[in-house]
Image (cartoon, rainbow, N blue to C red):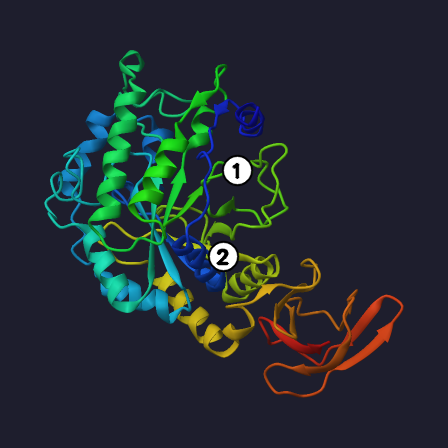
Amino acid sequence: MIVAALAGMLGGTAVQAQPGYVPSEENIKSRTEFDECRLGIFIHWGLYSTFAQGEWYMQNAGITLDEYSKVADAFYPHHFNAREWVKAFKDAGAGYVTFTSRHHEGFSMWKTDVSDYNIVDATPYKRDIIRQLADACHDEDLRLHLYYSHLDWGREDYPMGRTGKKCGKDSTRADYDHYFKFMNAQLTELLTRYGEIGAIWFDGMWDHDEDKTPFDWRLDEQYALIHKLQPGCLVGNNHHGSVIPGEDIQIFERDLPGENTTGWVQEGMQISAKNPLETCTTMNGMWGYKIADQNYKSLDQIVALLVRTSGHGANLLMNIGPQPNGELPATALSRLKELGEWMRQYGSTIKGTKAGDIKPQDWGATTRKGDQLYVHVTDHEATSVTLPLQCKVKSAVEFETSAKVECKKTSEGYVLTLNPHKDKADYIVVLTTK
């Protein structure tokens, strides 16, 4: 009955939980450390960057694998510098980076033994990207998470879903047992060759959500394999549904917990009260590099999003799509630098906090650390805010200056009369509570 219920939540997908899953001590420790980060950097990088049309170019343009794969011979990211990337991420205040080891195009960004369609064997670059990134992350104490796609637009053993139908595959040659073994062989490589991996971030199960017969991904076996190889490695799955046993993180794509602005959330999805939460979104419009997409969020917009996400008790995973030469776009680097300057001054009101006492509001959000409640006002025009708090407020001061902020108890809670703050991305008032 559990399987049937979960299948209903996830559309046309049969989902089996990892039987009897109990998180290990290492896993619980990883969850706690992850939950304290509040900011991570998402990297979507693969062959698709060469076309500069986003990560779905193969699918959207209907290019066959025979033609698409030819670009590998020209993929030479000669300006890639893992240590410069990691330094930029850490300076921005991020606690981890999630990197696309293999996206839906099927190209592997490491030296895998089970396919020659990879960065070392198929390109003139001949160097293992994940090896370089893992070494830099471990040296700088930045957690490395690895995105891994459940679907593949090019491999014929992957059963055809609702995408990839124009990419030249012979659907009669589908063999999920063979594909499942291939995926697990790759996951084993990733979890045994590159040191400690903070999380495996799955994506693509929605590809079979329209199947008449629910598709069995055999997640129970896959999740068990991951937890056996690295007990402290967290498992997350971007299936847009409730957490199932075996998953350690609940993911929200382009949405905050409890919201459904995209329309992707599965009916009946519940927000986990036990698992860390994460919202992933883009710094501009696309996940992968698109040359025409220069619609980058401003620092104020990023801060407001980080504040609202933290106010829900979730991490913000902010995406950047690197250029084909291995460089991060100049505007993205500029935003990271600006965000880092902001985080060095105000990050203590975000990192290591819990969701505030009230849900995020139009004016901003609240976060809590011990007896201190941080009131983040991101609405530049707000002159006062009403807080329907159950706790007692002992004092109210500006975080930046320690100047007193007028705070009156009313029948609706507490009303803060704000000092001028039009020049602040986030005007923060610290309430000491009892």
Q: Foreground: 409 or 85?
A: 409
Residue type at tag 2: Leu
Q: Judge the density around disc 2: few (<14), some (14-19), many (≥20) Cα neighbours within 10 Å.
A: many
Residue at x 67%, y 66% (from the top left corner): 379
Residue that protrudes farthest toward the top in the picture: 172
Position of 373 with respect to 336 (left or right) is: right
Give the structural element (helix, strand or loop) at label 2.
Answer: strand
Residue at x 61%, y 87% (from the top left corner): 401
Above or below: residue 423 compared with residue 65: below
Q: Judge the density around disc 1: few (<14), some (14-19), many (≥20) Cα neighbours within 10 Å.
A: many
Above or below: residue 234 compared with residue 264: below
Task: Say whether disc 2 or disc 1 marks the residue closer to the N-terminus.
Answer: 1
Give the residue number, with chain letter if any, for mark 2: 316
> Residue 6: x, y in percent?
55, 29
Give the structural element (helix, strand or loop) at label 1.
Answer: loop
Residue 240 is tagged as 1
Quadrant in the rendering for residue 404: bottom right
